[in-house]
Image: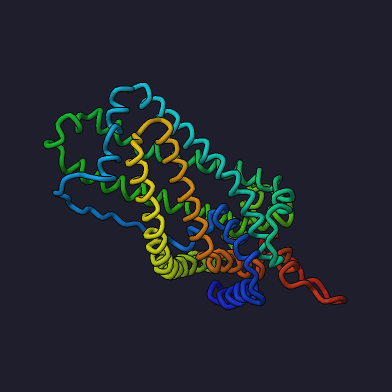
Amino acid sequence: MPISAIDAINPAFNHAKKQLFEPFRFSQWWRLGLVGMLAGEMGSGGGFHGNFNIPSTHRQGGSEQFLASAWPKLFSDHPLIVAGLIAFMVVAGIGLIVLFTYVSSVMRFILFDSIVTRECHIRQGWVRRRREGRMLFLWQMALLVLSLVAMAILIGIPASFAWGLGWFQHPHEHMLPLILGGIVLVLEFLALIVGFSVVHVMTKDFVVPQMALENVTAFEGWNRLWRAVKAEKSGYALYIGMKIGLAIAASMATAIISLIVILVLALAIGGVGVAIVMAAKTAGATWNVQTITLAVAAAGIVLALLLFVLSLISVPVIVFFPAYSIYFLAARYPTLAAVIWPPLPGSVTPVQSGLI
Protein backbone atom coordinates (compact mmCIF):
# COMPACT_ATOMS: atom_id res chain seq x y z
CA MET A 1 0.00 0.00 0.00
CA PRO A 2 1.22 3.57 -0.73
CA ILE A 3 2.81 5.17 2.31
CA SER A 4 2.45 8.83 3.21
CA ALA A 5 5.18 11.44 2.94
CA ILE A 6 5.52 11.30 6.73
CA ASP A 7 5.87 7.51 6.79
CA ALA A 8 8.69 7.68 4.19
CA ILE A 9 10.96 9.67 6.52
CA ASN A 10 11.93 6.78 8.80
CA PRO A 11 12.98 4.29 6.07
CA ALA A 12 14.90 7.05 4.27
CA PHE A 13 16.71 7.97 7.48
CA ASN A 14 17.58 4.32 8.17
CA HIS A 15 18.76 3.89 4.60
CA ALA A 16 21.08 6.90 4.87
CA LYS A 17 22.45 5.69 8.20
CA LYS A 18 23.20 2.21 6.90
CA GLN A 19 24.70 3.39 3.64
CA LEU A 20 26.99 5.98 5.24
CA PHE A 21 27.96 4.40 8.56
CA GLU A 22 27.45 0.63 8.33
CA PRO A 23 30.31 0.51 7.60
CA PHE A 24 31.85 3.96 7.19
CA ARG A 25 33.91 4.17 3.99
CA PHE A 26 35.57 7.46 3.13
CA SER A 27 36.01 6.39 -0.50
CA GLN A 28 32.22 6.12 -0.81
CA TRP A 29 31.70 9.30 1.22
CA TRP A 30 33.74 11.56 -1.05
CA ARG A 31 32.31 9.94 -4.19
CA LEU A 32 28.79 10.62 -2.96
CA GLY A 33 29.79 14.18 -2.10
CA LEU A 34 31.21 14.75 -5.58
CA VAL A 35 28.24 13.16 -7.35
CA GLY A 36 25.77 15.07 -5.18
CA MET A 37 27.55 18.37 -5.82
CA LEU A 38 27.63 17.83 -9.59
CA ALA A 39 24.03 16.60 -9.59
CA GLY A 40 22.90 19.77 -7.85
CA GLU A 41 21.65 17.92 -4.79
CA MET A 42 23.62 20.17 -2.42
CA GLY A 43 20.84 22.73 -2.87
CA SER A 44 18.68 20.56 -0.61
CA GLY A 45 21.00 21.43 2.25
CA GLY A 46 20.61 25.18 1.80
CA GLY A 47 23.25 27.88 1.90
CA PHE A 48 24.04 31.24 3.29
CA HIS A 49 25.80 34.44 2.43
CA GLY A 50 26.95 37.51 4.21
CA ASN A 51 27.76 41.10 3.38
CA PHE A 52 30.04 43.02 5.68
CA ASN A 53 30.84 46.68 5.05
CA ILE A 54 33.64 47.96 7.29
CA PRO A 55 34.37 51.68 6.89
CA SER A 56 38.01 52.55 6.52
CA THR A 57 39.70 55.88 7.10
CA HIS A 58 43.33 54.82 7.34
CA ARG A 59 45.92 55.34 4.65
CA GLN A 60 46.39 52.54 2.14
CA GLY A 61 49.55 50.59 2.46
CA GLY A 62 51.15 47.22 1.97
CA SER A 63 48.98 44.74 0.13
CA GLU A 64 46.18 47.31 -0.31
CA GLN A 65 48.42 49.50 -2.45
CA PHE A 66 49.43 46.47 -4.48
CA LEU A 67 45.81 45.50 -5.09
CA ALA A 68 44.82 49.06 -6.03
CA SER A 69 47.81 49.94 -8.18
CA ALA A 70 47.66 49.47 -11.92
CA TRP A 71 44.31 47.60 -11.86
CA PRO A 72 42.03 50.54 -12.84
CA LYS A 73 44.67 51.99 -15.16
CA LEU A 74 45.06 48.70 -17.00
CA PHE A 75 41.41 48.66 -18.03
CA SER A 76 40.92 52.40 -18.54
CA ASP A 77 43.83 52.49 -20.99
CA HIS A 78 42.63 49.38 -22.85
CA PRO A 79 38.84 49.54 -23.40
CA LEU A 80 39.03 46.74 -25.96
CA ILE A 81 40.34 44.46 -23.23
CA VAL A 82 37.30 45.32 -21.13
CA ALA A 83 34.89 44.63 -24.01
CA GLY A 84 36.65 41.40 -24.90
CA LEU A 85 36.71 40.28 -21.28
CA ILE A 86 32.99 40.96 -20.87
CA ALA A 87 32.16 39.10 -24.10
CA PHE A 88 34.36 36.19 -23.04
CA MET A 89 32.71 36.03 -19.61
CA VAL A 90 29.22 36.02 -21.17
CA VAL A 91 30.08 33.26 -23.64
CA ALA A 92 31.97 31.29 -20.99
CA GLY A 93 29.08 31.70 -18.56
CA ILE A 94 26.57 30.31 -21.07
CA GLY A 95 28.94 27.50 -21.93
CA LEU A 96 29.43 26.62 -18.27
CA ILE A 97 25.66 26.58 -17.70
CA VAL A 98 25.16 24.17 -20.60
CA LEU A 99 28.12 22.02 -19.52
CA PHE A 100 27.01 21.84 -15.90
CA THR A 101 23.44 21.03 -16.97
CA TYR A 102 24.71 18.07 -19.01
CA VAL A 103 27.04 16.85 -16.27
CA SER A 104 24.33 17.22 -13.62
CA SER A 105 21.88 15.30 -15.82
CA VAL A 106 24.18 12.26 -16.01
CA MET A 107 25.17 12.58 -12.35
CA ARG A 108 21.50 12.54 -11.34
CA PHE A 109 21.24 8.96 -12.62
CA ILE A 110 24.54 8.00 -11.01
CA LEU A 111 23.20 9.34 -7.71
CA PHE A 112 19.98 7.37 -8.15
CA ASP A 113 21.95 4.17 -8.80
CA SER A 114 24.19 4.93 -5.81
CA ILE A 115 21.21 5.18 -3.48
CA VAL A 116 19.45 2.10 -4.84
CA THR A 117 22.54 -0.15 -4.81
CA ARG A 118 24.26 1.60 -1.87
CA GLU A 119 27.44 1.70 -3.95
CA CYS A 120 28.77 4.76 -5.76
CA HIS A 121 30.83 4.10 -8.90
CA ILE A 122 31.36 7.28 -10.90
CA ARG A 123 33.29 5.98 -13.91
CA GLN A 124 31.07 2.97 -14.53
CA GLY A 125 27.98 5.03 -13.90
CA TRP A 126 29.05 7.70 -16.39
CA VAL A 127 29.53 5.11 -19.13
CA ARG A 128 26.26 3.39 -18.31
CA ARG A 129 24.02 6.42 -17.89
CA ARG A 130 25.09 8.75 -20.70
CA ARG A 131 22.03 7.98 -22.84
CA GLU A 132 19.54 8.69 -20.04
CA GLY A 133 21.61 11.73 -19.08
CA ARG A 134 21.29 13.14 -22.59
CA MET A 135 17.51 12.73 -22.50
CA LEU A 136 17.30 14.48 -19.14
CA PHE A 137 19.68 17.17 -20.41
CA LEU A 138 17.39 17.94 -23.34
CA TRP A 139 14.42 18.13 -20.96
CA GLN A 140 16.25 20.48 -18.60
CA MET A 141 17.42 22.74 -21.43
CA ALA A 142 13.87 22.88 -22.80
CA LEU A 143 12.59 23.73 -19.33
CA LEU A 144 15.28 26.42 -18.96
CA VAL A 145 14.41 28.01 -22.31
CA LEU A 146 10.71 27.86 -21.49
CA SER A 147 11.28 29.55 -18.13
CA LEU A 148 13.35 32.32 -19.74
CA VAL A 149 10.68 32.89 -22.41
CA ALA A 150 7.95 32.95 -19.76
CA MET A 151 9.90 35.48 -17.69
CA ALA A 152 10.59 37.62 -20.75
CA ILE A 153 6.89 37.65 -21.60
CA LEU A 154 5.94 38.29 -17.99
CA ILE A 155 8.24 41.30 -17.77
CA GLY A 156 8.24 42.45 -21.39
CA ILE A 157 4.49 42.77 -22.00
CA PRO A 158 3.71 44.83 -18.85
CA ALA A 159 6.82 46.98 -19.42
CA SER A 160 5.80 47.64 -23.05
CA PHE A 161 2.28 48.47 -21.93
CA ALA A 162 3.53 50.91 -19.29
CA TRP A 163 5.98 52.45 -21.75
CA GLY A 164 3.25 52.91 -24.36
CA LEU A 165 1.09 54.73 -21.82
CA GLY A 166 4.00 57.01 -20.91
CA TRP A 167 4.25 55.89 -17.30
CA PHE A 168 8.05 55.72 -17.38
CA GLN A 169 8.41 59.17 -18.94
CA HIS A 170 6.52 60.79 -16.06
CA PRO A 171 6.68 58.27 -13.21
CA HIS A 172 5.64 60.76 -10.50
CA GLU A 173 2.29 61.18 -12.22
CA HIS A 174 1.62 57.44 -12.28
CA MET A 175 2.92 56.24 -8.94
CA LEU A 176 -0.19 54.26 -7.98
CA PRO A 177 -0.45 52.11 -11.15
CA LEU A 178 3.32 51.61 -11.14
CA ILE A 179 3.30 50.42 -7.53
CA LEU A 180 0.26 48.18 -7.98
CA GLY A 181 1.61 46.83 -11.24
CA GLY A 182 4.96 46.19 -9.62
CA ILE A 183 3.33 44.24 -6.78
CA VAL A 184 1.34 42.11 -9.22
CA LEU A 185 4.44 41.55 -11.34
CA VAL A 186 6.47 40.41 -8.32
CA LEU A 187 3.72 38.01 -7.22
CA GLU A 188 3.46 36.56 -10.73
CA PHE A 189 7.24 36.25 -10.90
CA LEU A 190 7.36 34.38 -7.58
CA ALA A 191 4.53 32.10 -8.71
CA LEU A 192 6.45 31.35 -11.90
CA ILE A 193 9.61 30.55 -9.95
CA VAL A 194 7.71 28.27 -7.57
CA GLY A 195 5.99 26.51 -10.47
CA PHE A 196 9.20 25.75 -12.36
CA SER A 197 10.91 24.73 -9.11
CA VAL A 198 8.15 22.21 -8.38
CA VAL A 199 8.47 20.81 -11.91
CA HIS A 200 12.23 20.48 -11.43
CA VAL A 201 11.86 18.70 -8.09
CA MET A 202 9.15 16.35 -9.36
CA THR A 203 11.29 15.53 -12.40
CA LYS A 204 14.38 14.54 -10.45
CA ASP A 205 12.41 12.75 -7.73
CA PHE A 206 9.76 10.87 -9.72
CA VAL A 207 10.60 10.99 -13.43
CA VAL A 208 14.30 10.12 -13.23
CA PRO A 209 13.57 6.72 -11.57
CA GLN A 210 11.26 5.83 -14.47
CA MET A 211 13.88 6.87 -17.00
CA ALA A 212 16.53 4.87 -15.15
CA LEU A 213 14.49 1.68 -14.75
CA GLU A 214 12.41 1.58 -17.93
CA ASN A 215 14.35 3.75 -20.39
CA VAL A 216 11.38 6.05 -21.02
CA THR A 217 11.69 9.69 -22.04
CA ALA A 218 11.13 12.56 -19.64
CA PHE A 219 7.90 13.43 -21.47
CA GLU A 220 6.54 9.88 -21.07
CA GLY A 221 7.65 9.87 -17.44
CA TRP A 222 5.79 13.12 -16.82
CA ASN A 223 2.69 11.77 -18.56
CA ARG A 224 2.66 8.86 -16.13
CA LEU A 225 3.44 11.07 -13.17
CA TRP A 226 0.68 13.52 -14.04
CA ARG A 227 -1.89 10.71 -14.02
CA ALA A 228 -0.63 9.58 -10.63
CA VAL A 229 -0.73 13.13 -9.22
CA LYS A 230 -4.32 13.62 -10.39
CA ALA A 231 -5.28 10.35 -8.72
CA GLU A 232 -3.57 11.26 -5.42
CA LYS A 233 -3.38 15.05 -5.18
CA SER A 234 -3.23 15.20 -1.39
CA GLY A 235 -0.45 12.61 -1.12
CA TYR A 236 1.87 14.42 -3.52
CA ALA A 237 0.96 17.82 -2.07
CA LEU A 238 1.91 16.55 1.37
CA TYR A 239 5.18 15.25 -0.08
CA ILE A 240 6.07 18.68 -1.48
CA GLY A 241 5.17 20.32 1.83
CA MET A 242 7.18 17.82 3.84
CA LYS A 243 10.15 18.17 1.54
CA ILE A 244 10.13 21.94 1.95
CA GLY A 245 10.03 21.58 5.73
CA LEU A 246 12.79 18.97 5.76
CA ALA A 247 14.90 21.08 3.41
CA ILE A 248 14.60 24.08 5.73
CA ALA A 249 15.68 21.98 8.72
CA ALA A 250 18.57 20.46 6.76
CA SER A 251 19.59 23.90 5.52
CA MET A 252 19.83 25.27 9.03
CA ALA A 253 21.94 22.34 10.25
CA THR A 254 24.34 22.29 7.30
CA ALA A 255 24.59 26.09 7.26
CA ILE A 256 25.81 26.18 10.86
CA ILE A 257 28.40 23.46 10.27
CA SER A 258 29.45 24.97 6.93
CA LEU A 259 29.86 28.42 8.46
CA ILE A 260 32.26 27.07 11.08
CA VAL A 261 34.27 25.19 8.45
CA ILE A 262 34.36 28.20 6.11
CA LEU A 263 35.63 30.48 8.87
CA VAL A 264 38.45 28.04 9.66
CA LEU A 265 39.35 27.68 5.98
CA ALA A 266 39.11 31.43 5.43
CA LEU A 267 41.63 32.08 8.18
CA ALA A 268 44.04 29.50 6.77
CA ILE A 269 43.66 30.43 3.10
CA GLY A 270 43.53 34.15 3.89
CA GLY A 271 46.83 33.94 5.72
CA VAL A 272 48.47 32.21 2.79
CA GLY A 273 46.96 34.74 0.37
CA VAL A 274 48.24 37.72 2.34
CA ALA A 275 51.71 36.19 2.46
CA ILE A 276 51.68 35.67 -1.32
CA VAL A 277 50.48 39.23 -1.99
CA MET A 278 53.13 40.69 0.28
CA ALA A 279 55.82 38.59 -1.37
CA ALA A 280 54.62 39.68 -4.82
CA LYS A 281 54.66 43.34 -3.76
CA THR A 282 58.16 42.99 -2.38
CA ALA A 283 59.26 41.46 -5.70
CA GLY A 284 57.81 44.48 -7.54
CA ALA A 285 54.91 42.63 -9.22
CA THR A 286 52.00 44.65 -10.63
CA TRP A 287 48.67 43.79 -12.14
CA ASN A 288 49.02 42.59 -15.73
CA VAL A 289 47.59 39.83 -17.89
CA GLN A 290 49.82 37.21 -16.27
CA THR A 291 49.14 38.16 -12.66
CA ILE A 292 45.40 38.54 -13.30
CA THR A 293 45.35 35.08 -14.89
CA LEU A 294 47.18 33.61 -11.91
CA ALA A 295 44.81 35.34 -9.51
CA VAL A 296 41.74 34.01 -11.35
CA ALA A 297 43.22 30.50 -11.46
CA ALA A 298 44.03 30.63 -7.74
CA ALA A 299 40.51 31.85 -6.96
CA GLY A 300 39.08 29.00 -9.05
CA ILE A 301 41.16 26.44 -7.17
CA VAL A 302 40.10 27.86 -3.81
CA LEU A 303 36.44 27.87 -4.88
CA ALA A 304 36.66 24.27 -6.08
CA LEU A 305 38.29 23.24 -2.80
CA LEU A 306 35.61 25.04 -0.81
CA LEU A 307 32.80 23.42 -2.79
CA PHE A 308 34.35 19.99 -2.34
CA VAL A 309 34.64 20.48 1.43
CA LEU A 310 31.04 21.67 1.58
CA SER A 311 29.97 18.64 -0.46
CA LEU A 312 31.59 16.37 2.15
CA ILE A 313 29.60 18.13 4.86
CA SER A 314 26.41 17.72 2.82
CA VAL A 315 26.76 13.98 2.14
CA PRO A 316 24.10 12.94 4.72
CA VAL A 317 21.68 15.38 3.07
CA ILE A 318 22.75 14.23 -0.40
CA VAL A 319 21.86 10.64 0.51
CA PHE A 320 18.76 11.28 2.61
CA PHE A 321 16.68 13.34 0.17
CA PRO A 322 16.99 10.99 -2.84
CA ALA A 323 16.29 8.06 -0.49
CA TYR A 324 13.24 9.90 0.82
CA SER A 325 11.81 10.33 -2.68
CA ILE A 326 12.70 6.74 -3.61
CA TYR A 327 10.86 5.21 -0.64
CA PHE A 328 7.85 7.47 -1.19
CA LEU A 329 7.71 6.53 -4.87
CA ALA A 330 8.49 2.83 -4.44
CA ALA A 331 5.19 2.26 -2.65
CA ARG A 332 3.44 3.65 -5.74
CA TYR A 333 5.72 2.28 -8.47
CA PRO A 334 6.05 -1.52 -8.49
CA THR A 335 9.08 -1.52 -10.80
CA LEU A 336 11.05 0.54 -8.28
CA ALA A 337 9.60 -1.45 -5.36
CA ALA A 338 10.94 -4.65 -6.91
CA VAL A 339 14.42 -3.10 -6.89
CA ILE A 340 14.21 -1.72 -3.36
CA TRP A 341 12.48 -4.75 -1.88
CA PRO A 342 13.33 -7.74 -4.12
CA PRO A 343 10.55 -10.38 -3.99
CA LEU A 344 11.35 -13.64 -2.26
CA PRO A 345 11.70 -16.74 -4.45
CA GLY A 346 8.29 -18.18 -5.19
CA SER A 347 6.40 -15.09 -4.02
CA VAL A 348 3.60 -13.57 -6.06
CA THR A 349 4.36 -10.21 -7.74
CA PRO A 350 1.81 -7.55 -6.75
CA VAL A 351 -0.56 -6.27 -9.39
CA GLN A 352 0.90 -3.12 -10.88
CA SER A 353 -0.83 0.15 -10.13
CA GLY A 354 -0.09 3.84 -9.64
CA LEU A 355 2.27 5.18 -12.29
CA ILE A 356 2.09 2.10 -14.52
- Measuring from the top left, give residue 11's x and y in whole percent: 61, 76
Instruction: Tell me if residue 237 comes above or below residue 290 in the rendering.
Output: below
Give the residue at x 63% y 70%: 327
Specify whether 307 is left or right of 133: left
Residue 342: quadrant of the picture:
bottom right
The one nearer the camera, 52 or 285, is: 285
Specify whether 199 is left or right of 166: right
Give the residue at x 55% y 69%: 316
Instruction: Tell me if residue 88 comes above or below residue 64 in the rendering.
Output: above
The one nearer the camera, 268 or 244, is: 268
Give the residue at x 71% y 69%: 340
Q: Is residue 245 visible?
A: no
Specify whether 156 is left or right of 9: left
The one nearer the camera, 224 or 318, is: 318
- Measuring from the top left, give residue 62's x and y in whole percent: 26, 45
Give the residue at x 80% y 71%: 349
